[in-house]
């Protein structure tokens, strides 16, 4: 099954486990994400929730990206429009982003759609962590 960008429209539950190998600690983000069209060919991906790292107090967390359909692929852009990475929404695609001196690599898994995940492995001189994000449709979702 090949997904289209519109298949991601709507509200998602997100649970992200972060394993910081350098600090020897882990954390969890729980919240929601929404993908909605902007009307200019771009889509807003907006996440918000709570993150707890190590033994620290839970904090509010939010981030935004822009998505754009590009020839059967989905381009993910930073909120300011700079390119981040792109992927083909089928199977278990992989992508990478180099942000000197750090290397970001992601593997998506859509095999259990509409549940899906993204696993990021980040390495650099001061970074060595993995983030595994699980996404599932929220009950209140009304997207088609």
Image (cartoon, grey):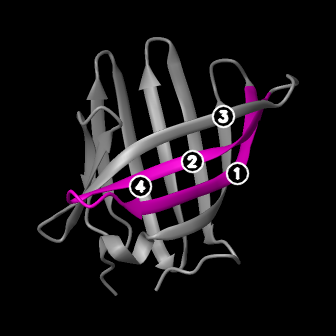
Q: Mark 4 and mark 2: span between their CA atoms?
A: 19 Å
Q: Mark 3 and mark 1: span between their CA atoms?
A: 9 Å
Q: Are marks 2 and 3 in contact (CB under 8 Å)?
A: yes
Q: Which mark is residue 47?
A: 2
Q: Sequence order check: which comes first, mark 4 or mark 3? A: 3
Q: Sequence order check: which comes first, mark 2 or mark 3? A: 2
Q: Circle 1 — which element?
A: strand
Q: Which residues are magenta?
A: 25-53
Screen quadrant of the N terminus: bottom left
| Residue under label 4 | 107
| Residue under label 1 | 31
Residue found farthest to the front = 39
Q: Nearer the viewer, residue 65 or 53?
A: 65
Q: Sequence order check: which comes first, mark 4 or mark 2? A: 2
Label 3 Cα neighbours within 10 Å, binned few <14 / some 14-19 / many ≥20: some
Residue found farthest to the top = 125
Q: Inspect the magenta stretch and tell me whether residue 27 lies in it.
A: yes
On the picture, is 141 further left or further right than 111? right
Q: Sequence order check: which comes first, mark 3 or mark 1? A: 1
Q: Sequence order check: which comes first, mark 1 or mark 4? A: 1
Please, what is the dominant secondary structure of the magenta stretch?
A: strand
Residue 136: name its quadrant.
Answer: bottom right
- Pinpoint residue 88: horizontal percent, then vertical percent: 26, 66
Q: Which residue is pictured at 71% across the width and 78% down the height?
A: 139
Q: Which residue is pictured at 59% across the width and 53% down the height?
A: 133
Q: Are marks 3 and 1 in contact (CB under 8 Å)?
A: yes
| Residue under label 3 | 61
Which dot, 4 or 3, sits closer to the camera?
3
- Pinpoint residue 98: horizontal percent, then vertical percent: 27, 29
Q: Inspect the magenta stretch and tell me whether residue 69 lies in it.
A: no
């Amino acid at each position: 099954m090949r997904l289209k960008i519109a298949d991601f429209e709507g509200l998602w539950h997100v649970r992200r486990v972060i394993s910081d190998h350098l600090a020897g600690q882990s954390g969890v983000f729980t919240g929601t994400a929404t993908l909605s069209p902007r009307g200019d060919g771009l889509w807003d991906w907006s996440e918000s929730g709570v993150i707890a790292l190590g033994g620290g107090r839970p904090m509010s967390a939010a981030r935004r990206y822009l998505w754009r359909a590009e020839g059967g692929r989905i381009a993910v852009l930073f909120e300011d429009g700079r390119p981040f990475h792109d992927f083909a929404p089928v199977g278990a695609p992989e992508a990478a982003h180099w942000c000197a001196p750090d290397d970001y690599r992601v593997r998506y898994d859509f095999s259990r759609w509409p549940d899906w995940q993204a696993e990021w492995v980040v390495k650099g001189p001061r970074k060595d962590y993995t983030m595994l994000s699980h996404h599932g449709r929220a009950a209140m979702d009304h997207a088609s």
